[in-house]
């Protein structure tokens, strides 16, 4: 198994207790990485929804018509667009910037691409951690089986 520095580690040299601790650490890391993966996918979906909203909801054909404006995720109020050429974009940490619809779409597309790269990197890490966990579980399983066989041999002798 590869360590963080790329060196090989012989799992059979560890005690059963050390392997169990290492397995728990890998389980915790995988859970955290899986949660991060889920959050990245959710953020990516939100950015895609923003792109879709700009494409379908902000156009000259909507100008002057009543639309539903979201105040929260479940509360909408009627309103009218004052400007169909510009939108307010949340650029993070509570800051909002006015951008043209074209620039806002580019901004969100860049965010989607950036998240896609991060997701692919995270998938590779999760795959490696899963492989490491599988190896540790195999060594632990072999230890338990050999300990069981050794105790069975001593009781029959």
Image (cartoon, grey):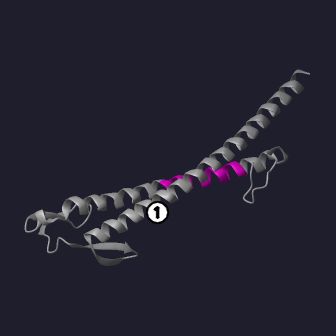
Q: Which residue is mark 1?
A: 114
- Percent position of residue 3, x then y: 74, 55
The one of 11 and 131 positioned closer to us in this rendering: 131
Q: Quadrant of residue 69?
A: bottom left
Query: Is residue 35 shown in magenta?
Result: yes
Q: Quadrant of residue 152?
A: top right
- Percent position of residue 106, x then y: 35, 67
Residue at 9% x, 65% y is 66
* Image height of 1 relative to 90, above or below: above
Residue at 72% x, 51% y is 21
The one of 126 and 114 positioned closer to us in this rendering: 114
User: What range of the chain is rendered magenta?
Assistant: 22-37
Residue lying at the far right of the rendered structure: 157
Q: Total marks drawn?
A: 1
Query: Is residue 155 shown in magenta?
Result: no
Residue at 72% x, 44% y is 136
What secondary structure is marked by label 1? helix
* Image height of 80 relative to 156, above or below: below
- Percent position of residue 141, x then y: 73, 36
């Amino acid at each position: 198994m590869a360590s963080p520095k790329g060196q090989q580690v012989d799992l059979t040299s560890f005690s059963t207790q050390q392997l169990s601790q290492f397995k728990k650490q890998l389980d915790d890391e995988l859970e955290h990485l899986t949660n991060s993966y889920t959050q990245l996918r959710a953020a990516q979906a939100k950015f895609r929804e923003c792109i879709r909203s700009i494409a379908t909801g902000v156009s000259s054909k909507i100008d002057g018509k009543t639309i539903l404006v979201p105040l929260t995720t479940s509360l909408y109020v009627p309103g009218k667009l004052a400007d169909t050429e510009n939108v307010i974009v949340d650029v993070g940490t509570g800051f909002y910037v006015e951008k043209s619809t074209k620039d806002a779409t580019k901004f969100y597309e860049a965010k989607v691409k950036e998240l896609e790269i991060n997701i692919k990197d995270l998938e590779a890490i999760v795959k490696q951690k899963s492989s490491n966990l599988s190896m540790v579980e195999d060594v632990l399983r072999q230890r338990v089986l050999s300990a069981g066989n050794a105790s069975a041999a001593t009781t029959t002798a």
